[in-house]
Amino acid sequence: MRQTTLDQVTTDALEQRLIELESFVSRIRSEQISLLREADRRQTPLADGCRSLQEWVAGRLDVGPETASVLVSAGRVLDDQIDLETALESGEASFDRILATANLVAAGATPDRVDLAAGLDIPGIRRLASMHRRVTKRDERSVFADRFVSLQPTLDRSSFRLWGQLPGADGQLVEQALVARGDLLPELPDGGRNPVGQRNADALVSIAQDSLTGTSGEETIGSGSVLSVFTDGTLAAPTDGEVGSVTSGGVRVGVATIEEIFCGGSVEHTAIVDGRPLAVGRSTRQIQPRLRRFVLFRDGGCCADGCTSRYRLQPHHRVPWSEGGQTDPDNLVTLCWPIFCKAEVEPRRRRGFHHHVVVHQMGYGIRPSSPPGRLRFNPPGHDPP
């Protein structure tokens, strides 16, 4: 159909044409599979210097390795399933459905189970096939031996990339833990929610923080969980703190992170000028432990409007230090760190995240006209009264 005529096509006709094209794709795939079998019989990949049929397919057809793997697998699994291959050749069913059903048969499913698959969607057929696959103790030991989690910092160590592989049960456990924590994050001040991937990231950081400091947020003596940050004053001064600050592990941090660091109770910050550390005096923005305890006692919980969290509470500069705000009780308010304390009487109540996520990570600012105990927030770039 040409673009100029699409506006005149009914929705039913459009749907029917899409189905016809999918049937055409099935017939084309059937022909491809037959040709690939013949190429494999002739050992064409070996003659061309390829290690496998999959490698040859990826190179000659200019497709990704995942597509090459599917085509080669389809050719092998359909080799002795004449009825399914005939259905594919005729375009009777989609390539994905035929392949999923073929895998179900190859897994040892009984005829009645295969008939049941006709009433399932493709993910349902795949789940049914997975239930029939044999998992030996040797398979389980192999999967367990291949487990890993890797963390790779970027070249400037301003962020980390995480990836890995876990045994199925362990992976599900981790997934459930992240989803459970992430689901307890409240809505943003504008009523929206962060994407699932971002909620998972916040949940992971929260769980890691709990393992170092406990759910109270208080530093454990001798735990080694104090974060040390060093700032080169010569570099930081002309750039308003955008250059010159790193953690003891070499992770580069910027202004937003520095602002959060000075609100924390388990962070050690050292300013360096001309190679010599400066003593931290009363005028520093860092909140000293005694003042921190007073502010938390005074406020009795998170000061964000409507938030009742008492989880990992931290003092925050209402007017940022970088904008002239002072480190004194009148300019300090209590905000909560992400998630909730699992010992709460109402474990499903959405709790906290105003300090770490809303303010320092997403850049919301405290609305100046907010009452001390009912703070509201302005989105980044907005400054209503």
Image (cartoon, helix red, strand yellow):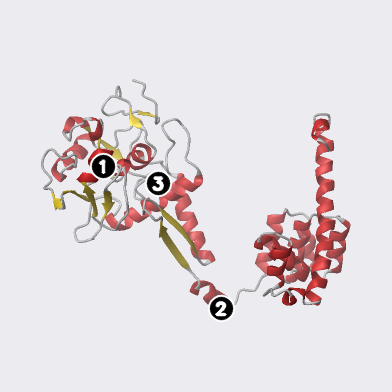
Residue 9 placement (x, y as % from top left): 83, 32
Q: Is residue 206 above or below residue 84?
A: above
Q: Which mark is residue 347?
A: 3
For the residue pair 300 and 96, the one nearer the viewer reads as: 96
Determine which residue is flagged by label 2: 137
Distance in Å between CA atoms under marks 1 and 2: 49 Å
The local crowd at label 3, few if under 14, some if 14 to 19, many if 20 or more residues have their Cα within 10 Å, is few
The local crowd at label 2, few if under 14, some if 14 to 19, many if 20 or more residues have their Cα within 10 Å, is few
Determine which residue is flagged by label 1: 314
Kind of residue at disc 1: Gln
Distance in Å between CA atoms under marks 2 and 3: 38 Å
Along the horizontal axis of the image, is 50 left or right of 258?
Answer: right
Q: Which mark is residue 304?
A: none
Residue 358 placement (x, y as % from top left): 37, 37
Q: Residue at x 78, y 57 (%)?
A: 95
Kind of residue at disc 3: Pro
Distance in Å between CA atoms under marks 3 and 1: 21 Å
Q: Is residue 331 above or below residue 74?
A: above
Q: Residue at x 48, y 50 (%)?
A: 179
What SS does tag 1 mark? strand
The reply to whether discs 2 and 3 touch (Cβ–Cβ < 8 Å) is no
Q: Residue furthest bottom?
A: 138
Say which of marks 3 and 1 sits in front: 1
Residue 34 placement (x, y as % from top left): 83, 67
Q: Residue at x 39, y 56 (%)?
A: 155
Say which of marks 2 and 3 sits in front: 2
